[in-house]
């Protein structure tokens, strides 16, 4: 920890006049959305200024529980709350007798896995982290509950994060969800983040798309361009609108600000086609029906966004498919062998994949949603037909071999699909397609299915290792055994012998 004299804090970068306690709770709510593990938030103000009110509101917002019991840690000095996102520790240093006692309270250890909210930070005598956020709360007005809030920090990211959450709040206030409570929903493997926005009995989803704000390095941006990953939230608006236009259940867009990367859309629930971490065959079969119907439609290359512009759906080129499969070489091979793949190995790998993809020239092509698996397939209890499956996370849709999406489903990266269930789902799909059109090429589709499955599995093995090592998210390593088993299963398919021989030589 670096010494920090609270009397010598930098000038405030943001001051706000807060009219009442409800507005105080809203600020706490909005700050909770941008907290990260390792953060320290210091709350400074006289007795009765509202520090405890703010802290209580922030903890309840973070928990998503307005009734969360938040006792004052005046005598215990610290109270830690365990949450799925990360832990929060509430410190009250009013009775701290010696600043050195802060070390005994374990602040350093707590910040390794969580964040800290500290009342009476002045009592720490300058032993708090240099990059903490300080919030000074003025005394309430004599005639009202109005207070002045002042924010300061030496760390520029605090200004950026507070500007971000205020932009989102301003955006939401311009919609029918004004005054809504906001709650963190997701933000892990992707750079995008999601919130639920609740006003009365209505719920929406707020997506923030940060690519236009410098959040992506040139290396990442170049890779995204190479593999045709969307870099603009207009993709969500365009693809979702087209899906809805053809009768599929995609979230309705209530409001959008493409320049700031914000989209407010309908909430389709949180129940997926998995229950208690196990695939539900009925639900997977319903998802197969969605794909079969989707693959019987001629989808456009260009989509009207509804705002005077169009969106071009990119082609899933062989170069993109090989680049993705090469993540296996870039990340998985070094993880399991202790060293990078040499240039000769890489050339052999790319040549074999090019030959496999060349063999799919006659495969049916159409829209490929690209992540058609359990986290993105929301079960609609009581619905009928294809309305039983709500579709999300389709912004990276490309035009490519349609077998890819079926392979995404039957070799689900997040759920164990037994060989018997995979076979049943494949046969159900083939039967549905043959009933659609007498000329359906069953053999050609089966060949494309095997190749696309091997490509996706190779890609995901690389991505999961990359998330663990580069992005410090080791939980993804738990999925590797599932994907390794899938790869063994796929490589035993007909017409996969050349790739199977390569993997047998180079895969540990």
Image (tube, rainbow, N blue to C red):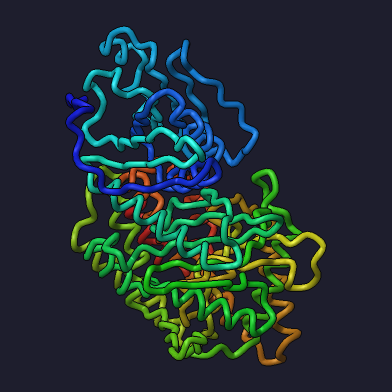
**Residue 47 position (above or below residue 384):** above
Q: Position of residue 412 (x, y in %)?
A: 57, 57
Can residue 456 be seen at all in this image of the molecule?
yes
Q: Residue at x 33, y 47 (%)?
A: 15
95 in relation to 327, above or below? above
Residue placed most toward the observer, 58 or 492: 58
Residue 349 located left or right of residue 140: left
Instruction: Report whether 247 appears left or right of 327.
Output: right
Is residue 508 at all visible to an observer of this figure? no
The x and y percentages for residue 415 are 60, 51
Residue at far top of view: 97
Residue 72 placement, left or right of 347: right
* Residue placed furthest toward the front: 143
Q: Is residue 178 left or right of residue 307?
A: right
In x, y percent, where is residue 291?
A: 64, 75
Q: Identify the residue at image location x=73%, y=87%.
A: 436
**Residue sitting at x 49%, y 85%:** 305
Q: Position of residue 274 (x, y in %)?
A: 67, 52
Which of the two residues, 31 or 221, is positioned nearer the viewer here? Answer: 31
Q: Quadrant of the N terminus?
A: top left
> How many discs mark residues in the rendered view?
0
Residue lying at 46% horizontally and 78% vertically, measured from the top left: 398
Q: Is residue 266 above or below residue 44?
A: below
Along the viewing direction, whichever of 110 and 435 lies nearer the viewer: 110
- Quarter of image, res 422: bottom right
């Amino acid at each position: 920890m670096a010494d920090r004299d609270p009397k010598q804090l930098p000038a405030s970068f943001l001051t706000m006049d807060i009219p009442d306690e409800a507005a105080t709770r809203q600020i706490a709510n909005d700050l909770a959305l941008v907290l990260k593990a390792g953060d320290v938030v210091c709350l400074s103000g006289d007795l009765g200024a509202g520090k405890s009110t703010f802290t209580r509101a922030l903890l309840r917002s973070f928990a998503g529980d307005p009734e969360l019991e938040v006792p004052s840690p005046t005598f215990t000095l610290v109270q830690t709350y365990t949450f799925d996102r990360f832990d929060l520790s509430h410190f009250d240093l009013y009775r701290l007798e010696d600043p050195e006692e802060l070390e005994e309270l374990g602040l350093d250890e707590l910040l390794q896995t969580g964040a800290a909210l500290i009342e009476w930070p002045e009592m720490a005598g300058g032993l708090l982290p240099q990059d903490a956020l300080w919030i000074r709360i003025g005394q309430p007005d004599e005639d009202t509950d109005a207070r002045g809030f002042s924010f300061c920090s030496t760390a520029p990211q605090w200004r950026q994060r507070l500007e971000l959450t205020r932009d989102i709040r301003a955006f939401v206030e311009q919609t029918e969800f004004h005054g809504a409570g906001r709650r963190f929903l997701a933000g892990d493997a992707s750079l995008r983040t999601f919130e639920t926005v609740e006003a009365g009995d209505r719920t929406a989803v707020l997506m923030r798309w940060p690519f236009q704000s410098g959040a992506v390095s040139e290396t990442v941006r170049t890779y995204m361009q190479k593999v045709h990953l969307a870099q603009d939230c207009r993709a969500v608006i365009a693809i979702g609108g087209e899906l809805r236009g053809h009768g599929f259940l995609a979230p309705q867009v209530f409001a959008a600000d493409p320049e700031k990367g914000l989209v407010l859309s309908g909430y389709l629930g949180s129940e997926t086609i998995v229950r208690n971490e196990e695939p539900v065959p009925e639900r997977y079969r319903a998802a197969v029906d969605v794909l079969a119907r989707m693959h019987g439609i001629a989808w456009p290359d260009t989509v009207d966004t509804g705002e005077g512009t169009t969106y071009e759906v990119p082609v899933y080129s062989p170069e993109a498919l090989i680049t993705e499969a090469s993540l296996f070489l870039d990340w998985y091979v070094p993880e399991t062998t202790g060293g990078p793949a040499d240039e000769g190995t890489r050339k052999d790998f790319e040549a074999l994949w090019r030959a496999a993809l060349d063999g799919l020239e006659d495969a049916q092509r159409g829209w490929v949603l690209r992540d058609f698996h359990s986290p993105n397939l929301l079960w609609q209890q009581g619905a009928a037909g294809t309305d039983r499956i709500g579709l999300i996370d389709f912004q990276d849709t490309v035009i490519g071999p349609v077998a890819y999406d079926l392979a995404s489903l039957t070799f689900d990266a997040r759920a164990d699909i037994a060989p018997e269930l995979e076979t049943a789902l494949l046969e159900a799909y083939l039967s549905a397609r043959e009933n659609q059109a007498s000329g359906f090429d069953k053999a050609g589709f089966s060949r494309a299915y095997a190749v696309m499955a091997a490509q996706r599995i190779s890609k995901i093995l690389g991505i999961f290792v990359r998330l663990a090592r580069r992005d410090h998210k080791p939980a993804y390593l738990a999925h590797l055994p599932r994907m390794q088993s899938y790869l063994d299963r796929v490589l035993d398919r007909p017409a996969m012998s050349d790739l199977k021989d390569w993997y047998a030589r180079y895969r540990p």
